[in-house]
Image: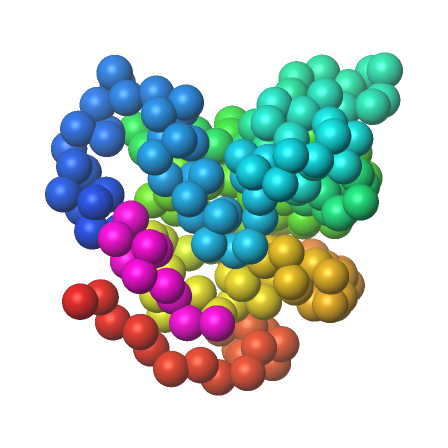
Amino acid sequence: MPARNKIIELIEKFDKFYKQLHSPDYNETELRVEYINPFFGELGWDVDNKQGYSQVYREVIHEAKMKRKDATGRPDYSFRIGGVPKFYVETKKPAVNIETDPNPALQLRSYIWTAKLPLGILTDFEEFAVYDGRIKPNKNDKASTARVLFIKYHDYPEKWDKIASIFSKEAILKGSFDEFAESTKAKKGTSDVDEEFLDCFFKPTPVHKLR
């Protein structure tokens, strides 16, 4: 699945307004509406419930309430199949450095650990980080701890096949998400998955350059 024109448009738009997007005044709600919702829409998810499903069967729940009584906080997104959560997404505004700041990662990892989800995503659109939810979070962990995939936004066209092969709705239904989650069990290090590991899981794909 090559990167669609919409993703390239989002990247170009992010570049154009880069300075404004990193202003303290730009908030997470604006980011979700302008960038995150369309991003996952291109992965086949009905982010805005245009199909009109009941709350029980909506594909995407915003600020989802976790079922465990001891759980605190609400993940920004819960992506579901048949009403069952498959992964959470936590967003931060672009002014936050997701790559090095440990606090956002700890927040997301606490959510997915509590919910017993294998994977979760932390993103500000500028950065896209995937974490293993089966590694217990610790307040002293680095931002890279349990991180199994990290992609910068300029690399989305080149890496789109990889993203779609794990997190698209189609990938969930075909079992590719579960295969990737199972394959990461052997990678218990504290840094990103290396290219050799990714190449073992994914078939080589052509590079799609920005226009």
Q: Which residue is drawn at 38% across and 66% down?
A: 3
User: Residue 60's spot in the image, x, y percent?
Assistant: 63, 37
Q: Which residue is drawn at 31% across and 61% down?
A: 5
Q: In which quarter of the image is the C terminus?
A: bottom left
User: Residue 172's spot in the image, x, y percent?
Assistant: 70, 59
State the residue in front, 48 or 98.
Answer: 48
Up the image or down, 34 lies above or below 210; here it is above
User: Residue 77's spot in the image, x, y percent?
Assistant: 60, 33
Give the quarter of the image for residue 65. top right
State the residue in front, 163 or 59.
Answer: 59
State the residue in front, 195 or 38.
Answer: 38
Counting every numbered tag in the picture gives 0
Q: How would you classify the magenta stretch by its main secondary structure? A: helix
Give the quarter of the image for residue 200. bottom right
Q: Is residue 194 left or right of 146 when viewed as pictured?
A: left
Q: Is residue 105 left or right of 157 when viewed as pictured?
A: right
* Render colour scheme: rainbow
Q: Is residue 122 left or right of 132 when viewed as pictured?
A: left
> Please, which residue is most extreme toward the right here?
69
Q: Residue at x 37, y 63 (%)?
A: 4
Residue 116 on the magenta segment = no
Q: Residue at x 54, y 63 (%)?
A: 164
Q: Can residue 162 be seen in this view?
A: yes
Up the image or down, 32 lies above or below 157; here it is above
Q: Give the range drawn in magenta.
A: 1-10
Residue 2 on the magenta segment = yes
Q: Is residue 140 left or right of 32 when viewed as pictured?
A: right
User: Residue 59's spot in the image, x, y percent?
Assistant: 67, 41
